[in-house]
Amino acid sequence: MNRKMKLKIIVDILMTVLLLLLMGYMITGETAHEWLGMGMFALFLLHNFLNISWYRGLIKGRYTIYRMFHTLVNLLLLSAMASLMVSSLILSRYVFAWLPIHGGMELGRNMHMAGAYWAFLLMSVHLGLHWGMIMGMIRKMLPGIGKGIVWKILAGAAAAYGAWAFVKNDLLSYMLLRNLFVFFDYDQPALWFFAEYIAMMELWACIAYYMAKAGRKKQGAG
């Protein structure tokens, strides 16, 4: 594994950890949330820089159904992150408080809420689309991990828990701005909060992984 690939993996791991922490902004507090957000955007820019060849290749080659889906996910994720960056400047009370921005708070809140939950889902899907490659690299270091019926049962159980958590936390209402106020259960231990979000991330990553796998298999058969 070359140095650039190792850096890509480290960046992706850090982005995943930060994503989970950012979803728990009521746990981390507003000041930490803003600084964590800054770190996320810095890593997102670095991630895109490390994968600049993907942008160069957009107008090259044939577009299969898998490639169209992959491209759509990436562009939607880019849009969600852009909306988060812009709304962060409007809403900031600490990191960017010095900026002469006045008004637009309601628009900023709506952009930030929708952008955050869409980014969470799309980053999970993005992770799933690359899961085969990620597991391939992990298995080189830890042979046998992720193989066998036990791992599949655990993955299925986590995905089922994620589906339950997705409905329980009503994420769709935030994504579609049907509910403009996020409910947070202060009695829920932080450990369970993050467990639910990890499970939801695993759910969408699994859906994306198996959809992509089925699509490539069907395309190969055709």
Image (tube, rainbow, N blue to C red):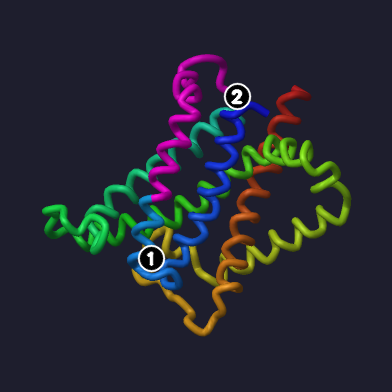
Label 1 sits on a secondary structure element that is loop
Q: Which residues are magenta?
A: 39-63
Q: Amino acid at mark 1?
A: Arg
Which label is found at residue 50? Answer: none
Check the image and name the residue furthest to the top.
60
Q: Quadrant of the C terminus?
A: top right
Q: Amino acid at mark 2?
A: Thr
Measured from the top left, where is residue 169 in percent x and y? Answer: 52, 70
Upstream in the sequence, badge 1 or badge 2? 2
Disc 2: which residue: 64
Give the CA separation, mark 1 to mark 2: 35 Å
Residue 95 falls in image quadrant = bottom left
Label 2 sits on a secondary structure element that is loop
Check the image and name the residue furthest to the front.
3
**Residue drawn at (54%, 29%), measured in percent from left and top?**
68
Disc 1: which residue: 178
181 lies left or right of 133: left
